[in-house]
Amino acid sequence: MFDTFKNRLEIIGKISTITALRISSGRSTEPIGADLPVIKDALEQPLIPGASFKGALRSRLESFLRGIDISLAEDPASFTSPSRNQIIKKLKEDYHDDAILTDKLLNQTDLISRLFGSPWIASKFQVRDLTVETDTWFGQYQERDGVAIDRDTETAADGKLYNFQVVPSGTNFHLKIVVENAENWELGLLMIGLHQFESEQIPLGGGRSRGLGVVSLKVEQLQWFDTGGDSGKLLNYLQNQVMKNMNDYQYREEKMEGLKQDWTEALILHLRNFISNNYTIPAKTE
């Protein structure tokens, strides 16, 4: 899937915290400060790991695909099962032609993993760590108290008081996503997921039952290039990259909406075809 360059999508945007955000770095061993600090970069500024964003996005898309057909998004625990490992190992032993082996591996891969990756197929989808927009963060964290509840007495458990840090609401983070060699329906799947962030339906981090982690995505720019199998177009693209002349590949507002619509329609068609090819009408019983 990756031996020949076909297309590249870059998405630039920002994540805004609607409510306070807590992505914990684990329990602190420092003698002073919060018991549960948030993840920070080397400059002690708040950070959203790309893996946290990607994981939340994948989880939401998996739930949608399982609602259509459970085979579209497998349980990741099955990826490392002995039987699955034996199947993959045998395929690699039996097929030495890369193209044939790739097709056989894809037959063992659910739809969500074709975009996000699995132990035997690399991800087409990369998310950089989200760094803070410094003009929206004022160098401070909020600290909040928490307490474990004794379920029997329904009161605070002895010795279970703790405090934790949160990033204040109104803080923005830079987002950059890169996707390479994706099918149109895979890009449609990504658009569906990003819309969930745009409409504040996917929270991030911990404390979500307390109302923490509500975020909003604003996609500011798409940069899209597809070779279409034309080597001349690829040569021009490579030259324009070096010359930093990428205006022809930038999409904003109305042009973005056109691409999103095309990719989403490709996804719906792909899923409808899957359903029609795999659904059998039950036989009537007398």
Image: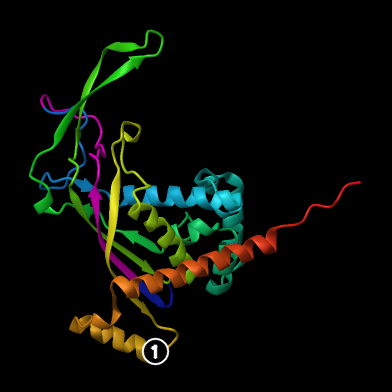
Q: Is residue 213 above or below residue 15?
A: above
Boundaries of the magenta span: 9-32
Horizontal arrangement in the rendering, residue 213 relative to residue 118 (left or right) = left
- Circle 1 sits on which residue? 231
View extreme (right): residue: 286
Percent position of residue 186, x then y = 47, 65
What residue is at 58 percent from the left and 45 percent from the top? Answer: 82
Is residue 245 one of those drawn in magenta?
A: no
What residue is at 45 percent from the left and 72 percent from the top? Answer: 262
What residue is at 39 percent from the left and 51 percent from the top? Answer: 57
Of residues 86 and 169, the one nearer the viewer is 169
Q: Is residue 248 above or below residue 53?
A: below
Is residue 24 one of those drawn in magenta?
A: yes
Percent position of residue 117, x then y = 45, 58
View extreme (bottom): residue: 232
Badge 1 element: helix
View extreme (top): residue: 153
What kind of residue is marked 1?
Ser
